[in-house]
């Protein structure tokens, strides 16, 4: 498959472009520079829905390839206006983007900091990149003392100093790294309403923190993919509800809505009232509720049913 055909196939809106992904993967040496050039041109000039759709797949392939040269451009891509980022990545904002960024991390945390501290950036991206910091620190790719310094500074420098999903990622990173000394600070964040009780309660943070402290080596392997580096693009994307179908070739492209849609015909009540935050998400994604539909659930049942 020629380069132009790969780009055209990746820009399709109606299916998972399996053959184009395989063709790019078979010639990474040529595909990676082509992808980076496309992303740089998009950052400089913008582009339509077809380009955005192609970049969605490029982003994930570059993560699969552990392409360190992509780290800076992808960080700048995630700093684009929130609506643009949401349209481009949809559910991947909470599902895969932070894992891709951990996979391409080149040792310099500043691009991550720039996004996390930017109040104009997408809050779900900012939240996820806090978890990226935890991931690369746990992997020994970032000094622990630097992660501690940054996460402590965030308490007074993150904007808004009020309820925002970015604070969810902040507390998650602290729990994942087992930073027991941060417990009073996180408790104050909860008390100040930075983290909505509809998303999480302080005792849940304590449970996560204690689990990490009790088993520091084992948690990453038992996190159900939450803190694993992004893997095979076809396998990862075809296994999610964004591309549900009976076979790869008829799989559907992401809809652009944040949460995986529930089936029509559900009663207009709270369908998730009995779902625990560590239970499998009832949407069928295979992920924990807290890492899948929790954010939209916090907005109320109507938001879920409208997904």
Image: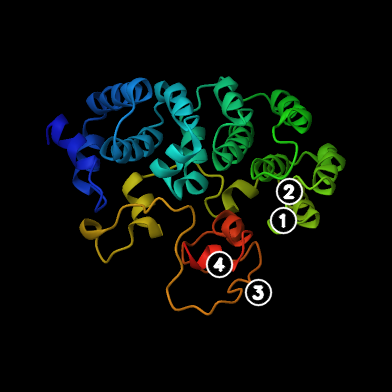
Q: Marks 1/4: CA distance? A: 19 Å
Q: Marks 3/4: CA distance? A: 17 Å
The residue to which callout 3 is attached is: 274
The answer to which of marks 4 and 2 sits earlier in the sequence is 2
State the residue in front, 70 or 231.
70
Q: Marks 3/1: CA distance? A: 15 Å
The residue to which callout 4 is attached is: 302
The answer to which of marks 1 and 2 sits earlier in the sequence is 2
x 85%, y 43%: residue: 188
The residue to which callout 2 is attached is: 195
Q: Marks 4/2: CA distance? A: 21 Å
Mark 1 vs 2: CB contact within 8 A: yes
Residue 289 locus on image (x, y percent): 58, 61
- For mark 4, give the secondary structure: helix
On residue 297, the disc is none
The answer to which of marks 3 and 4 sits earlier in the sequence is 3
Q: From the viewer's perspective, is the residue at label 1 or at label 4 nearer?
A: 4
Q: From the viewer's perspective, is the residue at label 1 or at label 2 nearer?
A: 2
The answer to which of marks 3 and 1 sits earlier in the sequence is 1
Would you place residue 260 above or below residue 39 in this image?
below
x 33%, y 57%: residue: 243
In the image: residue 54, left or right of residue 123: left
The residue to which callout 1 is attached is: 200
The answer to which of marks 1 and 4 sits earlier in the sequence is 1
Q: Residues within 10 Å of mark 2 (few under 14, many from 20)?
A: many
């Amino acid at each position: 498959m020629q380069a132009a055909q790969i780009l055209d196939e990746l820009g399709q809106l109606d299916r998972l472009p399996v053959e184009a992904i395989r063709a790019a993967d078979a010639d990474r040496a040529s595909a990676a520079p082509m992808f980076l050039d496309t992303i740089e041109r998009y950052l400089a000039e913008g582009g339509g829905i077809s380009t955005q759709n192609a970049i969605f797949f490029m982003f994930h392939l570059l993560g699969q390839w552990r392409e360190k040269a992509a780290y800076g451009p992808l960080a700048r891509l995630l700093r684009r206006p929130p609506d643009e980022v949401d349209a481009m990545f949809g559910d991947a904002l909470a599902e895969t983007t932070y894992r891709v960024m951990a996979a391409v991390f080149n040792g310099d945390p500043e691009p991550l900091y720039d996004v996390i501290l930017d109040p104009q950036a997408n809050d779900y991206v900012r939240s996820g990149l806090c978890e990226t910091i935890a991931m690369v620190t746990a992997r020994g790719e970032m000094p622990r003392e630097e992660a501690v310094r940054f996460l402590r500074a965030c308490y007074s420098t993150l904007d808004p100093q009020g309820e925002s999903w970015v604070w969810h990622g902040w507390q998650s990173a602290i729990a994942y790294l087992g930073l027991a000394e941060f417990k009073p600070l996180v408790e104050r964040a909860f008390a100040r309403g930075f983290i909505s009780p509809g998303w999480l309660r302080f005792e849940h943070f304590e449970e996560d923190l204690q689990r990490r402290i009790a088993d520091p080596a084992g948690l990453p392997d038992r996190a159900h993919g939450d803190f694993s580096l992004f893997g095979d693009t076809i396998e990862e994307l075809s296994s999610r509800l964004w591309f549900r179908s009976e076979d790869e070739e008829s799989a559907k492209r992401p809809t652009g809505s944040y949460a995986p849609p529930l089936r029509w015909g559900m009663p207009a009540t709270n369908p998730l009232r009995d779902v625990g935050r560590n239970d499998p998400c009832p949407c069928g994604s295979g992920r924990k509720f807290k890492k899948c539909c929790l954010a939209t659930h916090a907005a109320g049942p109507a938001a879920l049913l409208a997904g």
